[in-house]
Image (cartoon, rainbow, N blue to C red):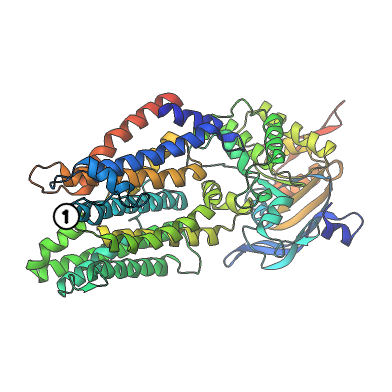
Amino acid sequence: MNQTVMDTRRGRSHPAVSLPRLLFWVGFVLTIILAAFISSGLGTFKTPYQSIIRLWLAPVFPGLSTGIDDTVQYIVIHVRLARICLAFLVGSALALAGTVYQGVLLNPLADPFTLGISTGAAFGASVAILLGVGSVQFLGVSALPAAAFAGALLALYLVYLLGSADGRIHIVTLVLAGIIVSTFLSAMINLMKSLNEESVSTIVFWIMGSLSGKSWAHVFLVLPYLIVGAAAIFCFTRELDLLSLGDIQAQQLGVNVPRVRFWLLLAASLITASAVAVSGIIGFVGLVIPHLVRLALGPRHTMLIPASLLAGGLLVLVSDSIARSILPGGEEIPVGVVTAIIGGPFFCYLLLRRKQQLRLH
Amino acid sequence: MLPSSAAKTAAPAALSVSALRCGYGEKEVLKGISFSVASGEFVGILGPNGAGKSTLVQALSGIIDASRGSIEIMGGSIEGLSLKERARRLAVIVQDGDIRFPFSCREIVEMGRYPHQRRWQMDSAGDLEAVEKALALTDTASLGERPISAVSGGERQRVFMAKSLAQETPILLLDEATSAMDIHRKLGIFKVLEQQNREENLTVLAVLHDINLAALFCRRMVFLKDGCIEADGPSDEVLTAEVLERVYENRVIVQEIENLHKKQVIFLP
């Protein structure tokens, strides 16, 4: 894979889509499909891969699924594959949003939660849990993600309101507003926890982030936001490159900086809000995947944005598969722990290797 | 060349500034200045700190708005031009080309093509040609794939200069762009600008601290002081001890370098 990466890097000044680059993307997508396939056979309920293959091919060749036990079908399609898809979408969403936040805020420490969206979502979820409406069902989805999404939007609104006091968005003011709103909402969450001791564990568990028990309904909750948001972000990949020159130089090169910044932040924030609403707070992905991909492919956003999307999805997919299948008793590890355990060492390896290459000290 | 400017006059001004007043918030820095630069001129903008040089650059490049007066670039009012259209007419080379992510030097230069490109458009043959030419002119082709974070300050400024040359604008604005360079690099860059100025009719407007550098290359000088134009004219005429002592409030000697027909200035303690 490294060879492919290097070839792609060398070929990037050529205007046409080069063969190595095409192979790289095809390989990337195939890796993800392979990971999803393997993952759909993992779990405490034993399912032979022979049945899994037949189920995967059934949409193309109808009739292949006949004769497979209904329970197996249900578990593979409605439990595992739904969760696998959701893991991929959430990972994609967080990595994509992280890349945009880092590029727009010009801050390598920015992640999808920098502007307080995670705390907003946690606040919304906590209110729902405290009021006891967290498990009320609506169209196959419980009220919890809806409340979390509303909370995230509330935080986003407050942050923009504070961060654009004079009608323009200033990066430092915006980040500061994110911290203030985040701190305030955290205090409110703690207040709610202390008021109602019974719901503490539910709130803590939600905040920790998990994809356990999620269905296709959750997938279709995230999907529209991810598609629309990603489409908006793809429109601005070149502008994202130019933004790294700083506001003044970008403006001098013809970029409408305030407008581009507004749409990019809005798109990334909505994507994050939808992901956090269904999965809780999964750390590490949004912060580290952009750096990881930048180290491997360079900082150009035309490559960085799609590659982050795929890499983030793959990381959470693999991590969640491990999180739900590694303990023998069927218990789960928090997925955020696994993303950090897998991603961390790989990130260190890339960083050290690139440092040698670039002779940076 | 541009239809809007061709329609206006036979010899349109590249830049036309009239009664320009602007500043930051309540503080007015430029107090009503007017001047016009014809296509193909090589102008130095000089003056002590706080005279309004940088503010003028910001106003000309559309970073800050004028509170009064007007700016026209190639016959088009600066407010009426789209950002990309303005960036196709006027390029700016800034003092500190700071960049966050380790783009390669070549990628930085390629960014100069942005105002010429539409969304989703791949680099065209014209884009690549402009980039190659800019790299060659600034002697930065060898830096090519090296990340901008790993080159020296002077090299970095040459890369940013190449980016602005790749923009292929008829007007180039320099904002102390050569300050971090070695003296021979400085001269090298100005020789390139002079060559572009003579051969391609590039209009150059250079904001400079270094009077002697300006004296070597600028054919016209504009001296700013306290937000007003103190002197404006051909270098032979305005580069005099009398003008300089008025602008800098310091005793100076202006010497003529024989054979070169250039003047150099010595400030006395």
| Quadrant of res A154 | bottom left
Residue A66 lies, with reference to residue A191, above or below; the image says above
Say if residue B37 shows up in the picture: yes
Q: Is residue A334 left or right of residue B116?
A: left
The picture places residue A348, in percent across and down from the top left corner, at 31, 32
Chain identity of mark 1: A
Residue A60 lies, with reference to residue B267, above or below; the image says below
Say if residue A360 shows up in the picture: no
| Quadrant of res B165 | top right
Secondary element at image label 1: helix
Residue position for label 1: A71
Q: Amino acid type of disc 1? A: Thr
- Which sits in the foreground, B248 or A128? A128
Q: Residue at x 62, y 32 (%)?
A: B181
Q: Residue at x 19, y 68 (%)?
A: A126
Residue A124 lies, with reference to residue B82, above or below; the image says below
Tag count: 1
Q: Residue at x 61, y 43 (%)?
A: B111
Residue A236 lies, with reference to residue A137, above or below; the image says above
